[in-house]
Each structure stands twice: as structure tokens, then as C-alpha cells.
Image (cartoon, helix red, strand yellow):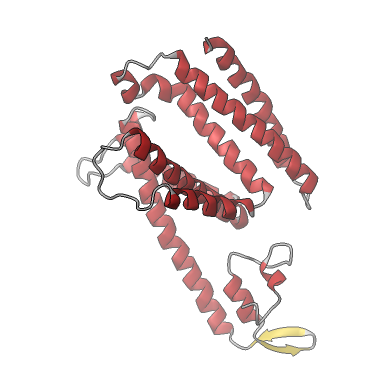
């Protein structure tokens, strides 16, 4: 594709739509008539766009099915409301969770630009991979005899390389995507702080539901994310090529609210 057009044409800064780079290259295949590029293969362009839409639809459908099952497991563990683990009497699926994500993702897709959604999906997936790699290291150290369906070879080399590769790809994503990731994580931490700690079945089994240490560790994690968000917001403000004041204002509001919230919990429960 870069043999057909300049690589800058595929970037947002170059005026291109990076969601369909193949279509951009096909549009450049043609002849110039009166200063306007006339594509030689307009039917191919339309076919490519239809294929992209079908590909997106199939991937999103599978991800939605998987996400509802993730919430189902978290609900069964007491970390989320029971509505997410209610199963349909006939089909035996978490139908209420499916309906929730149907509405939520539909609204998200309708009002959020494709670039933002794509980059959020990328950074979220890469971060999940990093957590999985770290989880392998932790599990191998803390629970070496736990039953396993498979074992990762060459530990710690493979997990460490996985973390470095995923983190390397995340670094090249823009600051605004990092800001959204941290804000999303802080919202998840809020849910855990207000509900998960009190209702965790694992915590109840181990009699650690009211343990001040859980609140202290969560508060410290939240303070760390608040500081990280402040740094990212500052860097984005200095680097932003376009007016992104809405995101900056939202970031500042998140920083102020959560600095007070996490600071309160840290002071209250520290020993």
C-alpha cells in the first residue's frame, strides 16, 4: 500500500481514515482527470469496505459474547451485581448481561469516533495481555502446584517478553488514549472499592472482607493512578495538536475527585 501512496495518507494527520487503509490505497489507483483522481477500481473499493464492515461485525459479536461471560464470572464471585449472572431459563445464557452490553456498545458506537474506539480497544487488549503475562509469573511463584490445563514454557522469559512487546506497542499510542485507559481503570477501581471489597465471596471465605489492608492497598493503587492521570493530562495538554479541552477538563475533574476519595480511604484505614 505504501508503494501506491505516501505513508502519511494513512494517518489521521495526513487526512486519511486509518480504519480502512486498503480503501485509501485503492482510491489512489487510477488516473488524474482535471486535477481529480478517478479510481480505476471503484467496485473493488466498495467490496473492501463491505468486507471490513463484516469483519468488524463478527469480531465485535464475539467480543460482546465474551465480555458478558467475564461479567458473569465476576458477578458469581460477588464483585458485580447479581443481575449479570442471571441465566435464561431456556437458553442458559446470561441474557440480561448480553442486553446490557448490546445497548451500551450501540450507544458507544453511535456517539464515539471510530479512531477513539479503535485505539481504546487496542490499548485495552494490550494491557489485558500484560496482566495475563504478569499473572503467569505470579501464579508460578505463589501457586506452583495448582492444577493447570497447560503450562507456559520458558518462564520467566516468555512472560517478560510478552510484557515488553505489548508495552512497546502501547507506548506508540497517543496520550489521549492513555488518559481514557487510566480513567476507565479508575472507574473499575471505584466499583471494586464501593462494592467488590464488601461482597467478594473469596474475601468472605477468608474472613478478609473488612480487613483495612484491602482498603489501604486499593487506595494506594488509586492514588498511583491519579498521579499517572495528572502526568498524562499535562503531557497531552502540551502535545495536543487540536483543541481537546473537553478531555482535559474531564481529566482534571477525575483527578480532583479521586485524589480526595482515595486520600480519605487511605487516611481512614491505614494502620
Q: Is residue 207 above or below residue 69?
A: above
Report the quarter where the N terminus lies.
bottom right
Q: Nearer the viewer, residue 238 or 35?
A: 238
Residues 82 and 257: in front is: 257
Residue at figure coordinates x 74%, y 42% from the top left: 235
Q: Is residue 234 above or below residue 78?
A: below
Query: What residue appears at the point 35 percent right and 21 percent down from the top-left corner?
Result: 203
| Residue 77 shows in this picture | yes
Q: For the point 28% across and 20% down, which residue is it?
A: 205
Question: 243 or 211: which is nearer to us?
Answer: 211
Q: Position of residue 201 (x, y in %)?
A: 31, 24
- Rendered location of residue 3, percent (x, y): 65, 82
Left or right: 243 with respect to 130?
right
- Corner quadrant of residue 94: top left
Residue beneath the point at 77% across and 49% down: 240
Q: Position of residue 86 (x, y in %)?
A: 29, 35
Q: Is residue 109 visible?
A: no
| Horizontal relation, residue 170 to residue 151: left or right | right
Q: Can you give x and y, in whole percent of width and height, for residue 56 in the image?
A: 47, 62
Amino acid at each position: 500500500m505504501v508503494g501506491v501512496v505516501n505513508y502519511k495518507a494513512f494517518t489521521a494527520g495526513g487526512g486519511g481514515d486509518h480504519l480502512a487503509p486498503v480503501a485509501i490505497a485503492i482510491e489512489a489507483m487510477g488516473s488524474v482527470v482535471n486535477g481529480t483522481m478517478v479510481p480505476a477500481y471503484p467496485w473493488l473499493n466498495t467490496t473492501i469496505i463491505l468486507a471490513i464492515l463484516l469483519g468488524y461485525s463478527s469480531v465485535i459479536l464475539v467480543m460482546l459474547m465474551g465480555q458478558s461471560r467475564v461479567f458473569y464470572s465476576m458477578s458469581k464471585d460477588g464483585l458485580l451485581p447479581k443481575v449479570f449472572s442471571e441465566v435464561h431459563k431456556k437458553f442458559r445464557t446470561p441474557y440480561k448481561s448480553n442486553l446490557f452490553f448490546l445497548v451500551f456498545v450501540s450507544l458507544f458506537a453511535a456517539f464515539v469516533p471510530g479512531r477513539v474506539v479503535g485505539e481504546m480497544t487496542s490499548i485495552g487488549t494490550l494491557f489485558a495481555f500484560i496482566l495475563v503475562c504478569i499473572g503467569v509469573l505470579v501464579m508460578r511463584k505463589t501457586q506452583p502446584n495448582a492444577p493447570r490445563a497447560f503450562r507456559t514454557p520458558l518462564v520467566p522469559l516468555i512472560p517478560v517478553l510478552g510484557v515488553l512487546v505489548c508495552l512497546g506497542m502501547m507506548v506508540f499510542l497517543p496520550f489521549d488514549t492513555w488518559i481514557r485507559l487510566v480513567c476507565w481503570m479508575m472507574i473499575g477501581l471505584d466499583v471494586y472499592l464501593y462494592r467488590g471489597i464488601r461482597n467478594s465471596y473469596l474475601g468472605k471465605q477468608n474472613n478478609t472482607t473488612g480487613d483495612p489492608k484491602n482498603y489501604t492497598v486499593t487506595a494506594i493503587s488509586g492514588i498511583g493512578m491519579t498521579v499517572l492521570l495528572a502526568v498524562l493530562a499535562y503531557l497531552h495538554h502540551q502535545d495536543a495538536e487540536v483543541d481537546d479541552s473537553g478531555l482535559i477538563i474531564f481529566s482534571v475533574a477525575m483527578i480532583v475527585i479521586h485524589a480526595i476519595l482515595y486520600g480519605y480511604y487511605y487516611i481512614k484505614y491505614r494502620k
